[in-house]
Image (cartoon, helix red, strand yellow):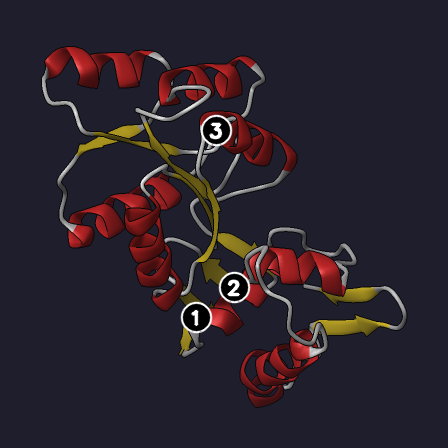
Amino acid sequence: MRVLLVEDEKRLADLLKGGLAGEGFAVDVAHDGRDGLWMASENVYDVIVLDVMLPRMNGYTVCARLRDAENWTPILMLTAKDGVHDEAEALDTGADDFLSKPFSYVVLLARLRALIRRGGRARPVSITVGDLTVDPAGLRCRRGEVEIALTPKEFAVLHGLARRPGEVVSKSELLAQAWDFSYDGDPNIVEVYISALRRKIDSPFGRSSLVTVRGAGYRLES
C-alpha cells in the first residue's frame, strides 16, 4: 500500500517513514503543503497523512483543495493543536480522521489501517479476482478459503496488480506502487517478486493467473 506523508518536521517524517516502511507501506514524503498537494494530485495513494501546520500551504487548505477536485483518498490529519474547534475544522475541510501530537505510533498505525479498510468513496474494502481475495487493510491474501502468507513487499506488488484486474501493469507502475520515489535500485527487482508470487498464489493451486505480457508488464487474471 502507498502512503503520502506531508510533514514539515523532518525528524518525525523520517521516523514515521521508517516505521511504516517496516510494516510494508511504500511511503512518499512532502515537507510543505504545495508539494503535498501536487504529489496527492499526480499520484494514487491508499491514504494520506497530512500535518496541519505546514509551510507554503496549511493542511486545511491542502485537504479542501483535494476534496474540491473530487480526490477522495482517505486523509488522516495531524495537528499540534488540541481542542474541539481544531478537530471540527479538520473534519469540516474533508479529513476522514485526526490525531493530535504527540501521538502513539501504534494508534497512528491502527487508524491508518482503519482508513484503508474503509477506503475512499469508490474503493472496495477488499479486492476479488476470481477466487483470489486481497485485503489491503489487513495485509491478507487468500485463494478460496486458503490463507496465503506473503511478505509486505510481495503483498504490495500483488495489490498493485489486483487493483487493476485484467489490465497490463508495467514494471515501472509496480515500482511506483510498492517502492517509494527514492528507490534507485535495479528495476528488475519486480521480476523477483513476481516469481515469488507465482510460487505462492498460483503453483500450489494449479493456477496461472499472474501473466507476463512480454515487453509491456504483467496482468492478473481471474
Residue sitting at 38 percent across and 19 percent down? Answer: 58
Q: Check disc 2 and report its element: helix, strand or loop.
A: helix
Circle 3: is it few (<14), some (14-19), or many (20+) Cα within 10 Å? few
Q: CA distance from mark 1 to mark 3?
A: 25 Å
How many numbered markers are drawn? Answer: 3
Residue 77 versus residue 10: which sits nearer the camera?
10
Q: Which mark is residue 164?
A: none
Specify the amino acid type for callout 3: Arg
Position in image of residue 22 (x %, y %): 35, 68
Q: CA distance from mark 2 to mark 3?
A: 21 Å
Q: CA distance from mark 2 to mark 1?
A: 6 Å
Residue 180 versus residue 129: which sits nearer the camera?
180
Image quadrant assignment for residue 75: top left
Q: Which mark is residue 121?
A: 3
Residue 80 versus residue 158: which sits nearer the camera?
80
Residue sitting at 14 percent across and 43 percent down? Answer: 103
Please give left or right for residue 211 compared with residue 120 in the image. right
- Residue to which mark 1 is pinned: 152
Please give left or right for residue 12 compared with residue 158 in the image. left
Specify the amino acid type for callout 2: Ala
